[in-house]
């Protein structure tokens, strides 16, 4: 009997959730960077276990989520809410932990969140390529106290080590049933969003300090009228302060050219056609706290159920 269901990838920023998702589905659906808070919304992507690949028609519907952190802007409140909300919706929670780091206060917070989860929680110890074998066992012993995990699976999303086993373990905990998505379905991310994210990925790769956090990319025009020959994409890179503009543009436009040419090559590979990419940089003060801009950027607000008012005595 095939199995099918939802698995959310939850954890601290930088744990490697998006790298793991891309590794499993075999395509870059979520951008990755060495800066925390890279992923800003939920990304659904489906792993198919097709008969053609020796599978039985099972499906794992992954939900990649923003890393859980203390939110200081409305953007971050929306991000964390989006991640936490998945805990109630999925069949299995995959808690991804960066095994090359020591558990800290942020991890305490995440472990408290999963303590209330009713569904099976699988602890994924990622980045084991950075770890000696002898360090793994004591770490597992230490993290077992967090939760009654359904399983603990060491992996390296970077090398693929352990990922097959992780897929098997996740499948075991999914309900039996027919496929939820068509067999060629990859992701819920529209092409425009994928394009904007790839541009943002290059910005993240080449900037430091506050800039990665205060940058957003909006698609102004996605012109497919001559797609076979040339896909034309016009983007605006938002920054928060006037002083950040020259950093993204660089001396003599060097930085923006580099971001543009790397993004264009990436987009050409992804869309399998020539791409014309127009980038401009604009200041949008305090966009991270502007609800309308956040809506427009596709970082939706998670509507929580209202709590009953506290009774006054
Ligand atoms: N060495 C090593 N690095 C990894 C591995 N998995 C991810 N990384 C690196 O860790 C960094 C963070 O990876 P992401 O996939 O963006 O992490 P994330 O959990 O999605 O982060 P947020 O979106 O910010 O929550 C990147 O530099 C990755 O290349 C791994 O298995 N081994
Ligand atoms: Mg991510």
Image: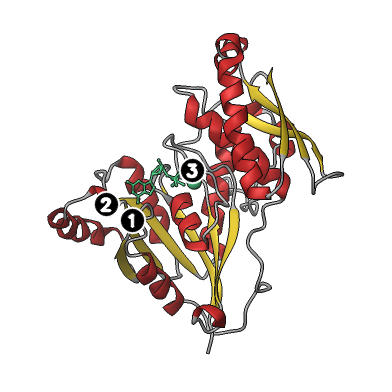
- Write down the residue under mark 3: 32
Q: Earlier in the sequence, mark 2 or mark 1?
A: 2
Relative height, residue 3 to residue 244 (above, below): below
Q: Determine crowd level at label 3: few under 14, some 14-19, many 20+ residues with C-alpha closer than 10 A.
A: many
**Tag shown at residue 129:** 2
Q: Earlier in the sequence, mark 1 or mark 3?
A: 3
Instruction: Check disc 3 and report its element: helix, strand or loop.
Output: loop
Colour scheme of the rendered structure: secondary structure
- Locate residue 119: give its quadrant: bottom left
Q: Is ligand 1 closer than 8 angstroms to the Cβ of mark 2? A: yes
- Write down the residue under mark 1: 156
The x and y percentages for residue 269 are 62, 47
Q: Nearer the viewer, residue 61 or 295?
A: 61
The x and y percentages for residue 309 are 62, 49
Q: Are marks 1 and 3 in contact (CB under 8 Å)?
A: no
**Residue visible at 43% across and 34% down in the picture:** 35
The x and y percentages for residue 61 are 56, 67
Left or right: 271, with 93 as reference point: right
């Amino acid at each position: 009997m095939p199995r099918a269901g939802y698995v959310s990838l939850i954890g601290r920023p930088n744990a490697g959730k998006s790298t793991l998702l891309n590794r499993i589905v075999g395509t870059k659906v979520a951008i990755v960077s060495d800066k925390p808070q890279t992923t800003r919304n939920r990304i659904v992507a489906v792993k198919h276990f097709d008969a053609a690949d020796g599978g039985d028609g099972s499906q794992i519907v992954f939900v990649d989520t923003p890393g859980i952190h203390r939110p200081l802007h409305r953007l971050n409140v929306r991000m964390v809410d989006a991640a936490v909300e998945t805990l109630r919706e999925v069949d299995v929670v995959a808690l991804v932990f960066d095994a090359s780091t020591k558990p800290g206060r942020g991890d305490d917070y995440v472990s408290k969140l999963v303590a209330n989860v009713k569904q099976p929680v699988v602890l994924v110890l990622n980045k084991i390529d950075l770890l000696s074998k002898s360090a793994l066992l004591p770490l597992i012993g230490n993290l077992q106290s967090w939760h009654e995990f359904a399983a603990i699976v060491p992996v390296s999303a970077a090398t693929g080590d352990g990922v097959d086993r992780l897929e098997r373990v996740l499948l075991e905990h999914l309900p039996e049933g027919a496929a939820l998505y068509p067999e060629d379905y990859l992701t819920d991310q529209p092409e425009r969003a994928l394009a904007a994210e790839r541009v943002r990925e290059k910005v993240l790769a080449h900037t430091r300090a506050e800039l990665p956090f205060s940058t957003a990319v909006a698609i102004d025009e996605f012109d497919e009228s001559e797609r076979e020959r040339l896909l034309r994409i016009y983007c605006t890179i938002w920054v928060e302060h006037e002083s950040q503009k020259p950093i993204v543009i660089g001396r003599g436009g060097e930085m923006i050219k580099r971001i543009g040419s790397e993004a264009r090559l990436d987009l050409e590979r992804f869309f399998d056609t020539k791409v014309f990419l127009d980038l401009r940089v604009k200041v949008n003060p305090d966009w991270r706290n502007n609800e309308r801009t956040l809506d427009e950027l596709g970082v939706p607000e998670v509507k929580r159920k209202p709590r009953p008012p506290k009774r006054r005595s």
